[in-house]
Amino acid sequence: MRFVSYEYRGARRAGALVGQEIVPIADATELGRQTPMELLEDPPLQYSLAVPYEAATLRPVVPHPGKIICVGLNYGSHVAETGRSDSDYPVLFTKFATSLLGPLDPIVLPAESDQVDYEAELAVIIGRAGRRISEGNALDHVAGYAVANDVTMRDFQYRTHQWLQGKAWDACTPLGPCLVRPDEIANPAALTIKLTLNGELMQDSDTSRLIFDVPTLIRVCSEFATLEAGDVLLTGTPGGVGFRRDPQVFLSPGDHVEVEIAGVGHLANDVVTENSERGANG
């Protein structure tokens, strides 16, 4: 089963996709802390309140995760294009819930950055809390999978050795379109992942090429932090990012970016400029 967070006629709900409709989950305004795995395994669906899928506005699939933990340099092709060497421990950084966008929302270019880049990624949604989770038990804590685009402001990312200032901008990370339960994914370690920019294929890989796979990432992250229902792990991007191309490619107004992961879903985002002038909000 697949689930979404959505808005319809001013009401925000979490619901299941049933045919061409969204059927709301009783007493759930969004996916995340309100919808642990036990609930998603047998959700109380309100069929009488179903709405047409095309009429709803999709929100980030988990609008308010307690934690967003991201992985850098997790595909060999991306490590190679950066000129870095392999590591025996994953590169980790964080984002905030305010960083998230809906799967069809426009990507707004901030006035401060001239190097806005794309990064196609598989997202893992945690559904059961745990600390110091073993790799053997890791997938028992996964509520499902989604698609993400880790949009990055490269000129800010490389101002220091830490990446936070380039990765955690408000409204920069499309996440969705839905949470796909693990029983719909035959093998999460063999999913094709592609990104196109204005119809041109820019990234093309599959999750078998992850250096640190999903169970490893869950083990590593849960060693230092309790993973809770609704937390999101972004597993890293393959080679082909714009910053490492020659010539470099950055997002511009009027661009259209799509990310697709086989069996998981599809993001489609237009690129626009900010309406307000720099500094208008202080």
Image: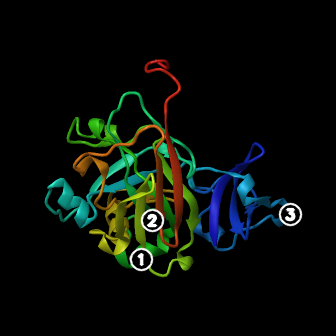
Q: CA distance from mark 1 to mark 2?
A: 10 Å
Counting residues from the start of the chain, the first of labels 3 and 2 encountered is: 3
Quick check: marks 1 and 2 in contact, CB under 8 Å?
A: yes
Please tell me the numbered disc located at residue 130.
2
Q: Where is residue 267? Give x, y as percent.
A: 52, 56
Q: Residues within 10 Å of mark 2 (few under 14, many from 20)?
A: some
Q: CA distance from mark 1 to mark 3?
A: 37 Å
Q: Nearer the viewer, mark 3 or mark 2?
A: 3
In the depicted structure, whether residue 260 falls above or below residue 163: below
Q: Residues within 10 Å of mark 1 (few under 14, many from 20)?
A: few
Q: Which residue is mark 3?
A: 48
Q: Secondary structure at mark 1?
A: helix
Query: Left of 160 or right of it: where is 209?
Result: right
Hey, which quadrant is residue 123 in on the image? bottom left
Q: Quadrant of the N terminus?
A: bottom right
Q: Secondary structure at mark 3?
A: helix
* Residue at the (29%, 68%) spot, across then down: 212
Query: Left of 80 or right of it: where is 166?
Result: right
For this rendering, which residue is in front, 89 or 56?
Answer: 56
Q: Residues within 10 Å of mark 3 (few under 14, many from 20)?
A: few
